[in-house]
Image (cartoon, grey):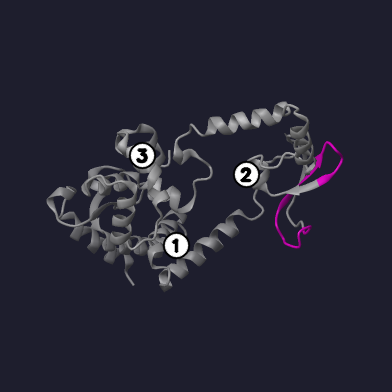
Amino acid sequence: MDYQKIYNALVEKAKVRGLDKSQHEGYFEIHHIVPRCLGGSDDDGNLVMFTAREHYIAHLILAKQFPNVEGLTYAAFMMSSNNKGSRHYQKLRSFVANYNSRRNYGKLKVDYTGKVFGRLTVLEYLLEHDIDGENIPKWKCLCTCGEFCYLATANIKRERVLSCGCLAIESKRDRWLGKEKPEYVRNKISETLKAKNLNPWDNYKIQGTNKLKWLSAQELYVFWSDNGKPKSMNMTKLYNEYFGTDHKRSFFKYILDKFINGWIPLEDEEWIKFSKGV
């Protein structure tokens, strides 16, 4: 099948509409003809206005045409999330899971050997460690109390665990005795509070659908404006009915609060850099 020919036909059909949504009835989405992950720009000449169905088909075609470009496969996967029963969704889901597994397994982005986190000193990385009965890469750590423990990379990276368990016991005891928290615990609390002032899209916990929400903030802003700037409850109902999703009110509340307070994504330089992957 000539995917390029089909894709070009979709693009040529959409070019006739121009880029002004106000000149047409219905819902439209802006699409990069040459995707940004393939070097495409944000110039008007590289943009077309697709219907939601055309946009979905275009991304399926791109994923088939460039199967090894993770960004295109992930985009098609996310756009298929409203049709989880389809064979396209199942195939994309399997591809994304296997691709990420093969790409990341055993890789060390950061070597934490010798680093100290709270009471723990990281000794070594164990790729084939079976202490939990599973083949999960883990780090062997030594606590100041003399006990060893084994932590996943996420727990090391985000400093979720600061001891072998002895700290929790002592902290509980100290609360009863009215003692002050150790300095490194106070510092960790301080860092957590500072992180709350970051842009929401910079939060490491923002993944999957939530990350896609912030990437699509401008499109969400336009939808919100075009529908009379509804509150989160009405916005949830309108959006779910229009796109067939099942989002909860909490999905929209924070971003709508920013819209209500005057935040426009395209006027925020930090958001623009984030959306471009800078």
Q: Which span is picked out in magenta?
A: 130-148
Q: Which x, y percent locates residue 277?
A: 42, 42
Quadrant housing the N terminus: bottom left
Q: Main secondary structure of the magenta part?
A: loop
- The CA span between labels 2 and 1 is 24 Å
Of 107 and 138, the residue lying toward us: 138
99 with respect to 188 (left or right) = left
Task: Give the crowd class for mark 1: few <14, some 14-19, many >=20 residues within 10 Å.
Answer: some
Tell me the element at label 3: helix
The residue that mark 1 highlights is: 67
Q: Which x, y percent locates residue 170?
A: 79, 37
The residue that mark 2 highlights is: 109
Question: Can you see residue 132?
Answer: yes
Residue shown at the point (85%, 44%) measured from the top left: 147
Tell me the element at label 1: loop
Could you say which disc has been placed on residue 257 in the image? 3
Residue shown at the point (59%, 30%) measured from the top left: 191
202 within the magenta span: no
131 within the magenta span: yes
